[in-house]
Amino acid sequence: KKRIILGTYILDSDNYESCFVKAQKARTLICDDFEKAFEKFDILISPTSPTTAFKIGSKMDTVSMYFSDIYTVPINLAGLPAITVPCGFSQGLPIGVQFIGKAFDEKTLIKTAYNFEQNTDYHKKRPEHIKQ
């Protein structure tokens, strides 16, 4: 609901230009920061989400849900490729790690995720409450 209201506000003709210009400036800063990081590194690593997965059937806290993609948004805004793979559990719920690649370098990104999975077994495990 909040995203729809926010989107409607931004798309209003009175707000569109100022919001769009500010958003493009923010996007440029994000892209610049990633470019600087990729001068030193081939791959960046971050959590996929600030929390574990939500429990199936649990009452969703809208604020937590809204911020659950906070680590993926900058990558999407920068137009960079990324892949998430399982990397463990916390209190029986899965955690993901996100590998972020340089623009148009999906090959290195996929190789990295593949090598991670070949050297760990997280992708073979399931949450305790999920039947195998």
Image (tube, helix red, strand yellow):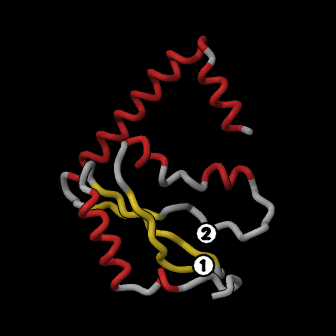
Q: Judge whether 73 appears above or below 22 on screen.
A: below
Residue sticking out furthest to the left: 39
Mark 2 sits on what residue?
Answer: 52
Residue placed most toward the observer, 60 or 108: 108
Residue at 38% across, 80% down:
117
Task: Decide: is 94 above or below 70.
Answer: below
Q: Nearer the viewer, residue 30 or 76?
A: 76
Q: Would residue 70 appear left or right of 115 to someone viewing this image? A: right
Marks 1 and 2 close (CB-CB < 8 Å) = yes
Place of residue 106 in the rendered image (x, y in percent of width and height, measured from the top left): 28, 58
Rendered image: mark on residue 90: 1
- Residue displayed at 76% across by 58% down: 60
Measure the C-alpha gap from mark 1 to mark 2: 7 Å
Looking at the rendered structure, the kind of residue marked 2 is: Thr
Q: Quadrant of residue 110?
A: bottom left
Image coordinates for residue 48, horizontal then vertical, percent? 49, 62
Is 97 left or right of 79, judged from the image as shown? right
Residue 81: numbered disc: none
| Residue that extends furthest to the front in the rendered view of this protein | 132
Mark 1: few/some/many CA within 10 Å (<14, 14-19, 20+): few
Image position, residue 46 (x, y; %): 42, 62
Which residue occupies 63% across, 88% down? 132
